[in-house]
């Protein structure tokens, strides 16, 4: 029982590993013994983060570059991970962007970028790494969605982001069903506002932040470290019978609607 959260001998890929949420999840997986590849577009930044994770956890960690909107780049990442570590057991899709624009004038380029990174990028990564998982008849996929896939905001601008996260939720359920025969678990973590660069527009607006926190039963927003435990759980044998679930890491926000 004491080993049920350990990930020794496992290989994890965390895309978006240079982000506030991705980095802490990668660190959590490495702390449980997984070898980790962190990936994002900025190679220098991701390499620096990989070094920090390896130093802190003593688990082998490598930084690789990927642009999830580009299929060739995602496929190349999958090849590099296989070359470096020989397999993949855990995929975390923590890449994401959030562009807020009014719904009556949502620039199509912004809409397309949201869907290219948040939806298409998640699909391409699941497909590229899922092939290896199907071959070995085991795997854990963790998509990072958002409470915005379920609930709108009191203020506007979130039509595109919310729609993209709703799509991530349904991709998670559809993949969970399609890949259950291959013993692959597919789940999503759906956080509320977490203190990272992506959340800056809300964090930097004191009035909005006050309203936001007032609606959270725990009366606070999330910190990146709130993510680590759930990520470890979903990557570990402790969650072997859980699939197709969107788990709200939200201080109770969605419980009260
Ligand atoms: N922070 C929140 O309040 C919050 C709440 C709910 C859900 N989420 C979700 O959590 C996930 C992580 O967000 P975060 O808060 O950690 O944001 P963040 O700090 O801005 O990190 C986003 C990450 O995505 C990477 N990325 C962006 N575009 C990419 C692309 N085309 N290809 C590969 N990587 C790309 C970025 O690295 P590069 O720029 O180097 O590529 C970065 O590592 C996102 O899916 C977000 O929607 C966040």
Image (cartoon, rainbow, N blue to C red):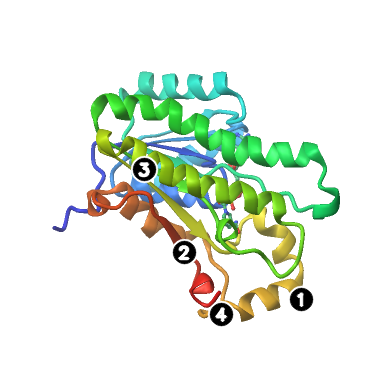
Observer-side mark, 3 or 2, equals: 3
Residue 181: x and y in percent read 26, 35
Say which residue appears at 29% left-offset and 49% top-offset.
Answer: 32
Q: As drawn, is 124 to the left or to the right of 61?
A: right
Q: As drawn, is 250 to the left or to the right of 81?
A: right
Q: Which mark is residue 249?
A: 2
Q: Earlier in the sequence, mark 1 or mark 3?
A: 3
Residue 177: x and y in percent read 35, 41
Q: Are marks 1 and 4 in contact (CB under 8 Å)?
A: no
* Whole-number angstrom distance, CA of label 3 to CA of label 2: 20 Å
Q: Earlier in the sequence, mark 4 or mark 3?
A: 3
SS assignment at label 1? helix
Q: As drawn, is 222 to the left or to the right of 199?
A: left
SS assignment at label 2? strand
According to the picture, the residue beneath numbered tag 4 turns out to be 219
* Whole-number angstrom distance, CA of label 1 to CA of label 3: 39 Å
């Amino acid at each position: 029982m004491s080993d049920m959260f350990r990930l020794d001998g496992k290989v994890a890929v965390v895309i978006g590993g240079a982000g506030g949420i991705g980095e802490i999840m990668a660190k959590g997986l490495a702390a449980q013994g997984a070898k980790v590849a962190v990936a994002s577009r900025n190679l220098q930044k991701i390499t620096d983060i990989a070094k920090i994770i390896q130093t802190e956890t003593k688990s082998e960690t490598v930084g690789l570059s990927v642009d999830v909107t580009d299929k060739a780049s995602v496929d190349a990442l999958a090849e590099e991970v296989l070359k470096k570590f020989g397999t993949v057991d855990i995929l975390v899709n923590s890449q994401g962007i959030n562009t807020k624009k009014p719904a009556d004038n949502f620039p199509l380029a912004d809409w397309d970028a949201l869907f290219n990174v948040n939806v298409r990028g998640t699909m391409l990564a699941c497909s590229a790494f899922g092939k290896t998982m199907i071959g070995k008849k085991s795997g854990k996929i963790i998509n990072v969605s958002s409470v915005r896939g379920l609930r709108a905001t009191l203020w506007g601008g979130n039509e595109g982001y919310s729609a993209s996260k709703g799509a991530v939720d349904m991709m998670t359920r559809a993949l969970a069903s399609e890949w259950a025969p291959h013993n692959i678990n597919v789940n999503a973590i759906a956080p509320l506002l977490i203190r990272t660069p992506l959340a800056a527009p809300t964090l930097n607006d004191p009035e909005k932040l006050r309203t936001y926190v007032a609606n959270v039963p725990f009366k606070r927003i999330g910190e990146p470290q709130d993510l680590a435990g759930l990520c470890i759980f979903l990557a570990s044998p402790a969650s072997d019978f859980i699939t197709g679930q969107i788990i709200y890491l939200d201080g109770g926000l969605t419980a009260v609607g």
